[in-house]
Image: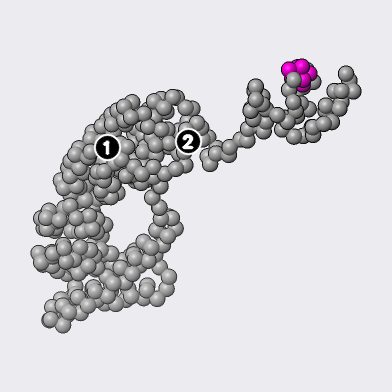
Amino acid sequence: MAMATLEAKAAYPSNMPGSLALTTEAVARMMRQWNYREGSGLGAQRQGIIAHLEPVVLPHPNAGIGHDETPHVNGLQNTPPVVEDEWSRRWRNLSRALSLERECCDKTLALLHSLDLQGDGSAETANALSAVVESTKVFDGERTPGTWRASLPPATIRYIVEEVITPRMAADAQEWEPVWDPNCQHWLRPWIPLVGHLPDSLYDTVESKLITYADHHGIVSSLKKYLHPIQWDTFARRHILPRLARQLRELRITPPKQMDGSLLTVMGWAPLVRAQDMVTILEAEFFDRWEKALLHWLRSARPSLGEAVAWCTGWRNAFTPELLADERVLARLEAGAAMVDRETQGLNRIVGYKV
């Protein structure tokens, strides 16, 4: 019997699938008693598998049952938006600020020269002209934004802003057509290094001009950088926030495929308003209906985990980085993730939607 056992062991390689050498002696003895033939499968017809089950390497370390890499055409953006790196953004803003400062200096010189040639002859104009000419020396070396303005005497700045630039801007603002000059290139932008922002005395004029174009993102966003924060908050509260609230209120949420793209439109405006104001609107007009639509879809259609996660991820990717950094927004998105987790048989973790 011992010789027969040794011959049986030698008859089939011990490192091949189906070899009894891969198990314990007790199990091997029992299998032989049941007429198991090494290298064959289990079953009456020996139809069972003999190869080991190979582990599947999932694309994510925490991927679980139901994970699917197949993209779902759900009308939503399932890849995060590309965000410009901080260094590039700072370099671009620095370059623009320095260029604008030089433009302001040149225009100020030209305007003072013009007043002098017209026979203004005042001591203030002559002193201001002399001071601005002297200040041009700062452009010969390296500088940071604000260096040129800092080189001018405060009295000179006050005279130029109040007596020279503001009257000129007031006349130009009356003739300004936002659709033809959305960046205020010809009457406001060149003077910003000296005036700092739109003079309060001109706000009503500018607001009246913008009412017609309050839904034109390009025109409104161009003006924001020229307004004082208080001025901008006033404009946003009157003309932007009510429209964004209405768009979210009328947004139709339709899983599994989102046909209404109003949220993307709203998110295009979101960076123009305060994040806390935007969160308040989302809580009042969006999140409750979004969670209700998600729950109804999960219970009525029973989508796959992959499809449900892709749908939630698409919504999340629509939010701006500023909103995603808000704890209240994250809490509502996590509530949606937990809902998917709970309704799809309680998997431990939703892959790709960890917020």
Which disc, if any, is residue 254? Answer: 1
In this picture, which residue range is highlighted in magenta? 28-34
- The kind of residue tagged 2 is His
Which disc, if any, is residue 4? Answer: none
Where does the image place residue 192, in percent across and percent down from the top left?
Answer: 25, 63
Q: Which residue sits at x=17%, y=49%?
A: 235
Q: Given contact means CB atoms under 8 Å apart, are the residues at marks 2 and 1 in contact? A: no
- Left or right? Give the position of 243 relative to 333: left
Q: Nearer the viewer, residue 255 or 117?
A: 255
Q: Which of 76 and 355 is in front in this view?
A: 76
Q: Quadrant of residue 47?
A: top right
Q: Is residue 30 magenta?
A: yes
Q: In which quarter of the image is the N terminus?
A: top right
Total number of numbered labels? Answer: 2
- The kind of residue tagged 1 is Thr
Which secondary structure type mostly characterizes the magenta part of the structure?
helix
Relative to 223, say whether 255 is above or below.
Answer: above
Which disc, if any, is residue 67? Answer: 2
